[in-house]
Image: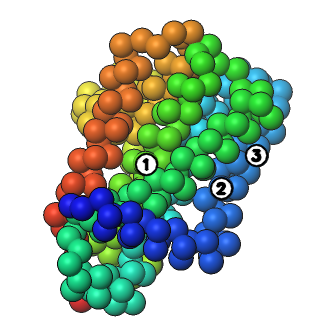
Amino acid sequence: MKPARTLATARRVLRQLAHDPRTIALLLFVPVLLLVLLYYVFDADRRSFDSIGASLLGIFPLVTMFLVTSIATLRERTSGTLERLLSMPLGKGDLIAGYALAFGVLAAVQASVATAVAVWLLDLNFAGPPGMLLLIALLDALLGTALGLFVSAFAASEFQVVQFMPAVIFPQILLCGLFAPRDSMQPVLEYVSNVLPMSYAVDGMNEVLQHTDPTGDFARDAVIVAGSALLVLFVGAATLRRRTP
């Protein structure tokens, strides 16, 4: 990998996204709108909003980054752009790192906007510092980016990308502890939830919700989410194909 090639790839992706206002709107405003909707759903129950809203502050960016990243990468392959790029002196690692950097910038902006709205506009109550909340939201968005890059290697069309949602994202939402404590699930489901990165994203948000100062559990959760994103990016680079058959 060479930094110059990685940065050149990232700049190209960001320039393309700059000409797609609908994608930018999806990335930046959909998570915010969903949080506002949730706020009014629990208008008479602030405690429920604080509890669920903190978790969804991490889940919403993950889901939107997964969709946008996977579809954008698939378009590069089906249009032949990916094949042309890989015919140049550009390694798979440079390409994946460039895409991850470009979408990582968007993920940082998205997580910052969503966290700012939740904290200062919707008055989300939590014990820890806002920076910890932002950190987990950002790591969740980066994880969604990594999963999107990985899944795009196995899809032949945008319709197939959407089909990966029930297989990759929905089970994590059901088992992450959002709807029921993980230790109250059936033993098999609890074991499965223990290996899903979204579970630790929700645990990290709950740590910020309940504790004033960072704890060892929070550090563990953040490291697991970040490590999962890096692992998925590494596997994505290894499985990257030049074009869709």
Q: CA distance from mark 1 to mark 3?
A: 24 Å
The picture places residue 9, in percent across and down from the top left corner, at 38, 70
Task: Give the vertical position of 184 relative to 2 (above or below).
Answer: above
Task: Give the vertical position of 81 relative to 214 (above or below).
Answer: below
**Residue pointed to by mark 3:** 37
Q: Amino acid at mark 2?
A: Leu
- Residue 100 visible to the viewer: yes
Task: Please rate how many residues cluster around mark 1, counting C-alpha atoms within 10 Å: few if below 14, some from 14 to 19, many from 20.
Answer: many
Residue closer to the observer: 13 or 154? 13
Q: Amino acid at mark 1?
A: Leu
- Say which quadrant the C terminus sits in: bottom left
Q: Residue at x 42, y 65 (%)?
A: 10
Q: Residue at x 46, y 42 (%)?
A: 140
- The mark found on residue 142 in the picture is 1
Outermost left residue: 238
Outermost front residue: 4
Q: Earlier in the sequence, mark 3 or mark 2?
A: 2
The picture places residue 224, in percent across and down from the top left corner, at 31, 33
- The mark found on residue 12 in the picture is none
Q: What kind of element bears circle 1?
A: helix
Q: What kind of element bears circle 3?
A: helix
The picture places residue 242, in percent across and down from the top left corner, at 23, 81
Task: Give the vertical position of 180 relative to 95 (above or below).
Answer: above
Q: What kind of element bears circle 2?
A: helix
**Residue pointed to by mark 2:** 28
The picture places residue 239, in percent across and down from the top left corner, at 18, 67
